[in-house]
Image (cartoon, rainbow, N blue to C red):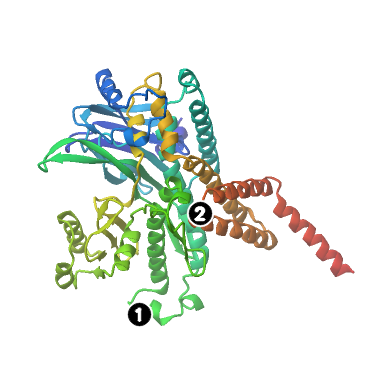
Amino acid sequence: METQSRAQNLRKRLGAQIAYRNDSPAVEYQAPTAALAGKKITLAWVAATEEDQQAIEALLPKPHPDGTPIQPEELPQGLPASIRLKLEIRVNGETKATGPALTAGSEPIGAGAFSNYFDLTTWDETTDLLVAGQQSALGLSVQGVSKTQLATLKTRLEETKQKLEAAQAAPENQRAALLQGLSAEHLTGDMLTANIWSYFAAHEAQGRVAGVQAGVIELPGLSYGLFHAAAEVQLRFGAYVTGVTFRGVLMDVGHLRHSAWVKNDDPKAPINNKPSLTANGRSAAQNRWGIYNRTRGQGASVLEGIIPERLFIDRSKCRYVNPNTTPPTVVNPTLPDCPRAITAVSAQAIAQAEGQKLYTLTEKNAAVALPKISASVEVRAAVTDALAVGKEVTIHERPIEVDGWRGTGYIVIDPQTGAGAYLIEGGARGGFFEKVGIAVMSLIGAFQKAEPALPAAAALLLLLAFGPVGAVLSLVVSGLALIADALSLLQNASNPCELAISAIVGGLLLITFAFALAAPGVGWAFAMAGAGYMLSWLVSENWVAGVCRVTGKVGRLRKAW
């Protein structure tokens, strides 16, 4: 019993608290990470009462008399403050904690934390500003995202899509029966979760490749992030909340952890024997580690934009630049530009393309450089606070305007470690993407019950809003699953032959994945799904080991001959 008690006390835990106006936690939930690993966690704002639910249903457009389908543009693009919502923390669709009723547009403070390794009674905590009415997925990376959880989500997404397509093709009087059992968790919850899990899977794969190139060992830590169907609070006279509008999606990964160090920190080693690596008085190993952390941070910021872009944009219907050709070519030149996600890195790239200067601010030059920067009061305050504690801030001259978003992207770095926060206006540590049709997910998520309260028309609108992108959303998860297989090949290699073959196969597939993120159309997703199937077969059949055994036997025969 004593051993069991000690083991229980040593288990890492995830804690989540939601407080409103700095009061005591209105919602609180804790659970061992082992019990949550690989499970879908959602923050669902649902109608607080039956009257609130009826008010939401009353906002939905009525069926057309001629039988033509309702269009996404006919949906209300927000909720008024007269509607009250309550927060439910759900694990795999099961409600674990419920908060009090709040008016739509209220802004409670969320805090998520893992217990610390060095002291399990303390917490490694990150706070997030939430919005009542903003449906969210909370994605966990418990030292990585597994292939199994990605495959499970992929299967569920495909089943949901098949139900929606069958209902769409059926007569009106049969649709409710075909959608029986389909809840907001299958629609909104799964689509949001696919984004945040895809982010962590891609980030882990990116780290493995970057680590090999930089001579660094990186191990994923306990991380979490949020992916929101973003709701913007509407104010009257700048003070009175009148409700929320649904604008797009927002990736906010503020709790990203990993352990990393250089493979060779011997000062006499050739890789460390460069004067430039020790010019600042620190060891070459420390500087290489810092450079690596900066590189990983920039890559993480880029992914926060790439993932939602690939999941929500049908590039066959808009104009974009294909960077995989030499020189880069414009695809679909006669169509409107594809929407762009905004991250700290992309905002600074856009600003530079407009001719703006980038400033790197420190305590030493802040007095001279800060007056040259035009930014909101909130951004300037955040920059000033960061500089006051010795951080380094990179920021562009003035706000940019892209696809309905206006603001500043800035990066706050710890110069000692290279770790930092990659921020956009509004305080999000991630990326914003404006998307017409997000109102569908937000409204569906607000229904209190699974069925029959979920109208068939509202469910079908989700399929209508995203069109063929639903297929990409499902298949990208399959593509990310092949990443896990590629890494499994490398990890399971037990001799030089297996390592060499695994590196070649895994490397080719990782290159395929990198190309797929920028490739046009839906075909790339099918290619990745096929590659994933092939790779899974190689792993399950132990093909690599078999090839090495045959190669070894041939080599011995040739030597004997």
Mark 1 Cα-neighbour bin, 10 Å: few <14, some 14–19, many ≥20: few
Question: Taking the image as drawn, is residue 338 in sight?
Answer: yes
Give the quarter of the figure containing the C terminus: bottom right
Answer with mark 1 or mark 2, whichever residue precedes in sequence: 1
Reading the image, the residue beneath label 2 is 520
Q: Is residue 37 above or below residue 292?
A: above
Identify the image quadrant of residue 540. top right
Reading the image, the residue beneath label 1 is 279
Say which of 307 and 138 sits in front.
307
Kindly identify the amino acid type of the residue bearing the numbered disc 2: Pro
Q: Is residue 239 above or below residue 375?
A: above
From the viewer's perspective, is the residue at label 1 or at label 2 nearer?
A: 2
Q: Residue at x 46, y 33 (%)?
A: 4
Q: Residue at x 46, y 70 (%)?
A: 265
x, y (%) of residue 259?
Answer: 43, 56
x, y (%) of residue 214?
Answer: 48, 67
- Left or right: residue 245 versus residue 503 is left
Kindly identify the amino acid type of the residue bearing the numbered disc 1: Ala
Numbered circle sitting on residue 135: none
Q: Residue at x 21, y 40 (%)?
A: 233
Residues under numbered marks 1 and 2 in contact, where contact means CB atoms less than 8 Å apart: no
- Left or right: residue 251 versus residue 547 is left
x, y (%) of residue 363?
Answer: 19, 69
- Left or right: residue 554 versus residue 188 is right
Q: Residue at x 45, y 25 (%)?
A: 182
Secondary structure at numbered mark 1: loop
Identify the image quadrant of residue 121. top left
- Give the distance between the C-alpha atoms of the residues marked 1 and 2, in whole angstroms: 45 Å
Q: Residue furthest left?
A: 237
Mark 2 Cα-neighbour bin, 10 Å: few <14, some 14–19, many ≥20: some
x, y (%) of residue 198?
Answer: 46, 46
